[in-house]
Amino acid sequence: MAGGRVVRTADRTIGSRRLAALLPADVRARPRYRALAEAVRSLVLDGRIPLHVRLPAEREFAEALGASRATVTAAYDLLRGSGYARSRRGSGTWTGLPEGHGPVGGVHLAAAAADPDGAGGPPVDLAVAAMGAPAGLLADALARAAQRLPEFAAHPGYHPFGLPELRAAVAARFTRRGLPTRPGQILVTSGAQQALSLVTALLCRPGDRVLAENPTYPNALDALRQAGLRTGPVPVSDDGWDLEAAESALRGTAPRLVYSIPDFHNPTGALMPSEQRLRLIAATRASGSWLVVDETVADIALDVPAPAPTASLAVRGAADHVVTIGSLSKTHWGGIRVGWVRAAEKVVNELATVRVAADMAGSVLDQLVALAFLDGADDALPERLAQLRSRRAVLVRCLERHAPQWSWRMPPGGLSLWIDLGEPVASALAERAAGAGVYVSRGARFGVDPGTFAHRVRIPYTLPEDRLEEGVRRLAAAFHDGVPLTPSIERPHWVA
């Protein structure tokens, strides 16, 4: 569009009016070069301006702000001096990151390798946003699965599409939530992570462009990257999705696939409004892109009703390009590796072929347990949600007591808080905290652009209250120990 109103990802330029609109109101009202530079730096760190995009020309940006050109020039000088911008002769000023803010690795076993009897006591793992299994429900599900296992043991045990009863149960669950679904539209997988990997293997080829929210679930990013796909960002802030940027990227680049977590987004906890979902469905359909909706945490609705499936909002036939994935990992237990894909039957048939090449079929025992879980899901979930509300309240009180200078937005659902530390020291804090026996997910792991979100950490409220209190106490002590935090070498680590 004319007038610099949108981010144009095709030529990696951000328009002057668009950038001005992203700035805080106080900066727009009375722009001062230091405040302006700090605001742009924060937008880069928070992923709301992608890396390696060209900033507006100084004169054009000054006009959009109603400021002097000298103010913008001084701000750009500060950004270049601190490493958040770079100039290319004849091509303007481009966003960047200081040296040392590099990519973050994919897999770590820090908690497993740690000394379980360290000086600070047993480790507290705040890197995993998932709960343990509900003991009574698990025992009952195992007993019911054991009773039925002999009838399946007389057969070879390979079910590439999933057990027919489980496919029917998942389909019925979608239908109850407002999206009529046949069992033939369901493929049972080994968790939502395998579901995403199978979908990308079928629908994409190495080098294809895909869009993902920024920030987003790190393991999903790893799956996209390991498939050789080129990821582009759709900014998600504490205020929600930048749909204007998403629509612009879809028009400009026509990506093969868009990966979205609209339901209690991981890590921000945001809930995408229905009108934005409809815009995203329409924009992906117009660009010929597949829309993969991750519903793994859709049932973790703490303050609002659970949302209907995104595909159910579109008129009949307008959401055939929407593929929905989900699992029982967050609502029940990650140890039951059962997830699913909901898509057109033709797509499901082709996915089953890809799945056979990956692992033949899933565990019959796990699927029988999952079937028992789904049979009692409506009875068990309310207690689970009440427990999460209580733990979330404990986490908030602990943060207010031990780290009052940190900030966050209370999410209406999901499993974690997306904490703003106020300065880009998350990686150094995570390293120091690990020495005190507490493990936390640094924000850089969640960024499409490596090195962004260096001022963020994700803290789940899934542990028991006493462990949350101990974890926050140790984390805050590491932050306040009197020795300045500095950027550190990123070490591979994992997130759930």
Image (cartoon, rainbow, N blue to C red):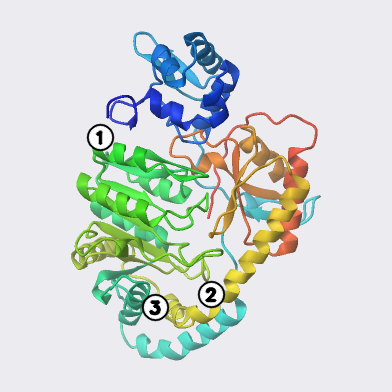
Few, some or many C-alpha atoms within 10 Å of disc 3 (few <14, some 14-19, many ≥20)? some
Tag 3 residue: 364
Residue 195 image offset from top left, x and y in percent: 35, 60
Looking at the rendered structure, the kind of residue marked 3 is Val
Q: Nearer the viewer, residue 194 or 419?
A: 419
Few, some or many C-alpha atoms within 10 Å of disc 2 (few <14, some 14-19, many ≥20)? some
Q: Is residue 314 left or right of residue 65?
A: left
The N terminus: image quadrant: top left
Above or below 275: residue 88: above
**Image point (52%, 53%), residue name:** 269
Quick one: label 3 or label 2, which is nearer the N terminus? 3
Tag 2 residue: 381
Q: Secondary structure at mark 1?
A: helix
Quick one: label 1 or label 3, which is nearer the N terminus? 1
**CB under 8 Å between callouts 1 and 3?**
no
**CB under 8 Å between callouts 1 and 2?**
no
Residue 424 image offset from top left, x and y in percent: 61, 32
Residue 153 image offset from top left, x and y in percent: 37, 86
Snapshot quadrant of residue 129: bottom right
Residue 228 in view of the camera:
no
Q: Secondary structure at mark 2?
A: helix
Q: Nearer the viewer, residue 409 or 432?
A: 409
Residue 252's label in the rendered image is: 1
